[in-house]
Image: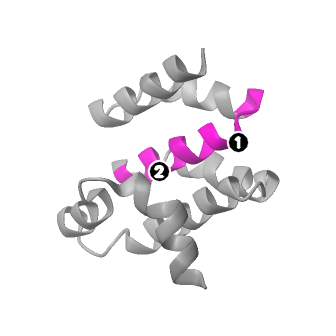
Amino acid sequence: MFTKILKLFVAPFFKGGLLVTSILIGGFTSLYSQIATSASLILALLNEKESAFSYLSKQVDDPDRFVRIIAVKGLAFIGDKKSIDIIKQKTQDKDEKVKNKAAEIINELK
């Protein structure tokens, strides 16, 4: 059952091997953070927005840029004002990929 949920909801967000690439580049130091953030993204997709928000809103400041990207995507699925405000802040992130993803999401929400 978990595998089906993972394939249905998470796989589309890791096109081009984003998760695999991040694990290989970042080593295993942030693997648990990536998994937990991905799980929170799934919660957002399953409409468990309050639970997801409490974690994702903190993960947007994680040192791992891939965790920040996943968190921004999860906040986009929540879509409330607090989430959108955080995504707008991430358009000023120090990492170009995070900035671009946040800007892309903001543009899609207009």
Q: 93 above or below 45?
A: above
Q: Residue furthest bottom?
A: 1
Please report the residue visible at 78 percent of the width from the left and 58 percent of the height from the top.
48
Mark 1: amino acid: Ile
- Amino acid at circle 2: Ile
Question: From the viewer's perspective, is residue 32 above or below residue 10?
Answer: below
Q: Is 77 inside the magenta-drawn segment?
A: yes
Q: Position of residue 90 (x, y in %)?
A: 48, 29
Looking at the magenta stretch, what is its main secondary structure? helix
Residue at image position (24%, 54%) is 16
The magenta-colored residue range is 66-82
* 104 on left or right of 57: left
Quadrant for the C terminus, please: top right
Vertical relation: 49 (above or below) 20:
above
Q: Is residue 26 above or below residue 97?
A: below
At 66% from the left edge and 25% from the top edge, which residue is drawn? 85
**Which of the pair 60/71 is nearer the observer?**
71
Q: Is residue 110 visible?
A: yes
Q: Looking at this view, is 27 or 14 the one in front?
A: 14
Question: Which residue occupies the foreground of this view, 43 or 28?
Answer: 43
Q: Which residue is mark 2?
A: 70
Secondary structure of residue under mark 1: helix
Percent from the top left, x then y, of residue 83? 68, 34
What is the spatial separation of the Cα atoms under label 1 and label 2, in whole angstroms?
13 Å
In-front residue for pair 61/40 = 40
